[in-house]
Image (cartoon, rainbow, N blue to C red):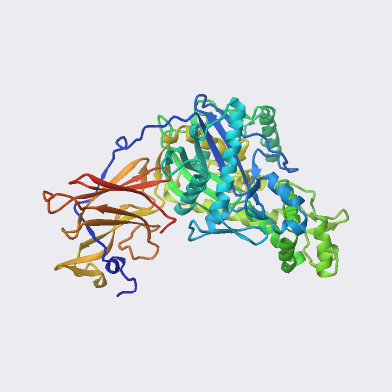
């Protein structure tokens, strides 16, 4: 056997061989199920650092309601969303979510708190885990492990119950889950397994079921943002590049003050928490013409995602021009730099111990940092003070035998001083330095995207997501790309994705063309051609020479796929007497794949078609049609025995192979 042993040879797989030249059939209407009628669309923005939901009744789609105010917000962080933190009891039962989880955990006695399971920022695990399965674990603050699927399901169940309760209170009668269409947003750069994982967690939380998958839409974050940005009116955004006054202030006032004024304008109407989306194309879009391009940069807590879209008139449908790219460059990177700075001053051994022994105080310290992080601005001159929790000062003295003050003097970190009120005083330069690595990565990545041929003549750059609130990031993007396109920031930028996801749920057909993130195909046998096929792939069956493990491609990575498009191929059993056909579906991130044994090719589905019980009139070259339909984030495959109309269906599955 060769270096890559052949799966087909070893399994003696009942093989298939292509019958006809490949052809693509578009039958978008044949398969449309009867559209269910939902009374309300609820979108959940499940973020790395914070989460929230919003909803709209299908009868009045122009009103988007953002969830009730949460109790227990933080100083210096005005937020419609709640932290993505979850607390389980020592018996591993769900206890609380968000501020409630954080505050309860914080108030526990240290002897008790070490038995409770507290999780934060756990969404990143889905991005960073290479071989994600239903069994992947998450680690709580106390070091104990719990299945990721359970944690995600608990979190989604919490939002489901909150939303249904709010809808019931509002309507005065109980609201049923069946009346809701759910939308959950995920980063576009997530790999397929992570997107599927989110759907599985939602099934576990009871939002929808494998029998009724249409009730849940997995939406891509930058796409949702893009849909919302189309509706923007001039008073709802800040144009960093304009020289004319926007929102009644002139851009020469610093960006920061403009932001506050912009926010005030919204907050006065905030009591109702309802945003009216005028059912028009916003002014900014009236400047866009057919074929115009714009880029959406969604910068959140964990990841930064970029998508390039093009307008298709007259309906203003969106077409994805360049596949989503990005990486783990979210605002968490700034927290990580702060942690590195603390390690530099106080020693890594101490910080590691402190996190384990005083987890609640560590959480406090990061909350204090968060509010100062939000005060960082390019033109800031006065220092930023970060309060150190008493137990930090106390534990440090026990651990090292000298004071925190002494450590700061000794560490020769110039920018950070000790203030007599028990605070770390950071110069603005020190704070800006914490942002620099993350912002540099974002700018670097954006430059690479701008250099792609598909991305010429971009008219606008929309900066959205929670991290887009940072004046440092705004300034960096404006100075790097302001000359190439107009940089636009929607007001209430942290809620952009949430509102766009609601609009998407009301009209999922608005995104018409996507780029396939992977190459898909099936494993087949081809007639062996000397000199063309590698000799180790030769398989002789009943006197016929076959080349095994051939990857027969359905669609290539980065190829445009229209929503609902079906690709069809015809095959025939390699051996006429076969009674069962097994069709294995494979995927790869590479474009040109020849064999299923190549590195990076993964199996992601199997179709088993039983050919028994068919009468003798079946033609000796029997035709098996295989179809793949590319839906929202789901892909369905089907095999049909043409002679008998027997068929099998399967959803593409990235978690269980």
Location of residue 495 with respect to 115 vertically, above or below:
above
Left or right of 82 in this view: 231: left
Quarter placement of the C terminus: bottom left
* Residue 28 position within the rendered picture, expressed as x and y whole percent measured from the top left: 32, 37
Left or right of 119 in this view: 545: left
Frontmost residue, 275 versus 202? 202
* Residue 125 position within the rendered picture, expressed as x and y whole percent measured from the top left: 56, 56
Location of residue 230 with respect to 59 vertically, above or below:
below
* Residue 521 position within the rendered picture, expressed as x and y whole percent measured from the top left: 32, 55
Frontmost residue, 533 versus 463? 533
Left or right of 573 in this view: 350: right
Left or right of 320 in this view: 401: right
- Numbered marks: total: 0
Residue at image x 53%, y 53%? 149
Residue 349 falls in image quadrant: bottom right
Location of residue 395 with respect to 197 vertically, above or below:
below
Residue at image x 35%, y 46%? 636
Quarter placement of the N terminus: bottom left
* Residue 286 position within the rendered picture, expressed as x and y whole percent measured from the top left: 49, 29
Is residue 328 among what the camera can see?
Answer: no
Tell which residue pokes out farthest to the right in this image: 420
């Amino acid at each position: 056997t060769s270096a890559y042993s052949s799966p087909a040879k070893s399994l003696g797989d009942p093989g298939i061989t292509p019958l006809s030249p490949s052809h693509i059939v578009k039958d978008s209407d044949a398969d449309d199920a009867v559209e269910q009628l939902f009374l309300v669309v609820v979108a959940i923005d499940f973020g790395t650092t914070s989460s929230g939901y919003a909803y709209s009744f299908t009868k009045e789609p122009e009103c988007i309601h953002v969830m009730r105010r949460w109790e227990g917000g933080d100083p210096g962080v005005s937020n419609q969303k709640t932290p993505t933190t979850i607390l389980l009891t020592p018996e591993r039962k769900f206890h609380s979510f968000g501020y409630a989880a954080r505050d309860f955990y914080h108030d526990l006695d240290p002897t008790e708190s070490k038995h409770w399971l507290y999780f934060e920022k756990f969404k990143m695990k889905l991005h960073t885990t290479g071989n994600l399965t239903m069994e992947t674990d998450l680690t709580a603050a106390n070091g104990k492990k719990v299945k990721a699927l359970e944690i995600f399901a608990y979190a989604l169940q919490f939002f489901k119950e909150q939303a249904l309760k709010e809808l019931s209170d509002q309507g005065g009668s109980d609201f049923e889950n069946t009346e809701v269409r759910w939308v959950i947003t995920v980063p576009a750069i997530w790999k397929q397994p992570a997107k599927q994982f989110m759907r599985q967690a939602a099934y576990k939380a009871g939002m929808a079921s494998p029998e009724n998958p249409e009730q849940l839409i997995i939406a891509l974050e930058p796409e949702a943002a893009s849909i919302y940005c189309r509706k923007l009116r001039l008073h709802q955004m800040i144009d960093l590049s304009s020289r004319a006054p926007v929102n009644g202030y002139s851009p020469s006032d610093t960006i920061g003050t403009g932001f506050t004024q912009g926010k005030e304008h919204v907050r006065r109407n905030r009591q109702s928490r309802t945003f009216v989306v005028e059912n028009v194309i916003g002014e900014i879009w009236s400047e866009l013409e057919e074929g115009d391009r714009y880029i959406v940069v969604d910068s959140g807590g964990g990841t930064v995602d970029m998508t390039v879209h093009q307008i298709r008139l007259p309906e203003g449908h969106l077409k994805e021009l360049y596949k989503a790219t990005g990486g783990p460059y979210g605002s968490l990177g700034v927290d990580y730099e702060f942690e590195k700075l603390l390690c530099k001053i106080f020693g890594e051994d101490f910080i590691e111990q402190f996190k384990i022994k005083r987890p609640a105080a560590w959480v406090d310290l990061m909350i204090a940092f968060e509010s100062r992080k939000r005060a960082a601005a390019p033109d800031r001159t006065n220092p930023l003070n970060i309060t150190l929790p008493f137990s930090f000062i106390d534990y440090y003295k026990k651990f090292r035998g000298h004071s925190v003050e002494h450590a700061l003097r000794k560490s020769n970190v110039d920018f950070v001083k000790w203030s007599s009120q028990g605070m770390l005083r950071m110069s603005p330069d020190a704070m800006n330095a914490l942002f620099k690595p993350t912002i540099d990565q974002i700018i670097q990545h954006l430059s690479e995207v701008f250099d792609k041929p598909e991305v010429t003549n971009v008219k606008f750059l929309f900066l959205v997501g929670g991290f887009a609130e940072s004046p440092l990031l705004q300034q960096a993007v404006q100075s790097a790309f302001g000359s190439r396109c107009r940089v636009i920031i929607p007001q209430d930028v942290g809620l952009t994705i949430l509102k766009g996801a609601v609009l998407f749920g009301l009209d999922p057909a608005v995104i018409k063309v996507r780029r396939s993130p992977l190459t898909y195909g099936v494993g087949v046998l081809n007639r062996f051609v000397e000199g063309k096929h590698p000799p180790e792939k030769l398989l002789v069956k009943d006197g016929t020479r076959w080349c095994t493990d051939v990857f027969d491609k359905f669609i290539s990575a980065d190829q445009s796929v229209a929503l609902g498009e079906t690709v069809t191929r015809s095959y025939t059993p390699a051996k006429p007497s076969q009674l069962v056909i097994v069709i294995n579906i494979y995927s790869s991130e590479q474009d040109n794949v020849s064999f299923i044994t190549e590195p990076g090719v993964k199996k992601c589905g199997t179709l088993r078609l039983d050919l028994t019980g068919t009468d003798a009139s079946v033609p000796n070259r029997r035709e098996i049609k295989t179809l793949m339909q590319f839906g929202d984030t789901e892909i369905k495959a089907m095999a049909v025995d043409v002679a008998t109309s027997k068929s099998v269906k399967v959803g593409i599955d990235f978690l269980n192979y």
